Amino acid sequence: MAKTDEVVSAKMIPVVQGIVDWIEAHIFDTLSVSAIAKKSGYSHWYFQRQFAMVTGCTLASYVSRRKMTIATIYLTQTQASIQSISQCLGYEGQAAFCRTFHRHFGMSPTRYRRDTPGKESNMQYPLRVGMEIEQERRSAAAAAARDQRMVFGVMTRRAPT
């Protein structure tokens, strides 16, 4: 990643986290990538690119995986019908929901419910972006402070204040 990309991504962290939080609050609605990008205040193309740089996944993939994670919870912990689960998650119809589910898990929702209760593969839990970047920043600052206290390869103590 180029230096300018790192700076842009760092500036976008609070924006992306705000959008992730908004997605979580509206996960049961019909969500489109363009509507979500518009909510960010940036252009559709720019926000999608920044979202991917900050999170490592596309916006569409994140929303779809979150909805599929919730679907698996409903499938394994309730007796709700596939139709009601698809409606609850904001899908236009049961067929669209089943296609998306099959793409993620390689099986139908009915088969998943029957064969794999409690399985947690392909789950997407809510993102908390920027934590790794903050940890790297703290580690770099600690290393810099440690390097400043090294004199000829020997650790020196700070003078008491």
Image (cartoon, rainbow, N blue to C red):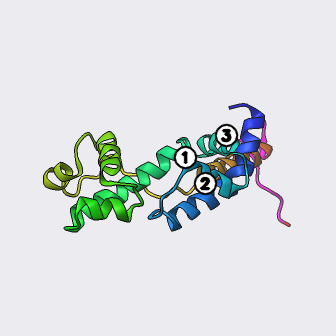
What residue does disc 1 label? 59
Mark 1 or mark 2, earlier in chain = 2
Q: Residues within 10 Å of mark 3 (few under 14, many from 20)?
A: few
What residue does disc 2 label? 35
Quarter of the image with the N terminus in it:
top right
x and y, in percent, of residue 156 in the image: 76, 49
Check disc 3 and give the amino acid type. Answer: Trp
What residue does disc 3 label? 45
Q: Is residue 154 magenta?
A: yes
The residue at 23%/67% (across/down) is: 80
The count of marks equals 3
Using residue 150 as the reference point, say whether residue 24 is left or right of it. left
Dot in front, 3 or 2 = 2
Can residue 76 be seen in this snapshot? yes
Residue span colored magenta = 149-160
The residue at 23%/51% (across/down) is: 109
Q: Residue furthest left?
A: 114
The image quarter containing residue 152 is top right
x and y, in percent, of residue 108 in the image: 22, 46
Q: CA distance from mark 1 to mark 3?
A: 11 Å
Can residue 130 be seen in this snapshot? no
Labels 3 & 2 near each other (Cβ < 8 A)? no
Check disc 2 and give the amino acid type. Answer: Ala
Label 1 SS: helix
Q: CA distance from mark 3 to mark 2?
A: 12 Å
Label 3 SS: helix
The residue at 72%/48% (across/down) is: 10
Check disc 1 and give the amino acid type. Answer: Leu
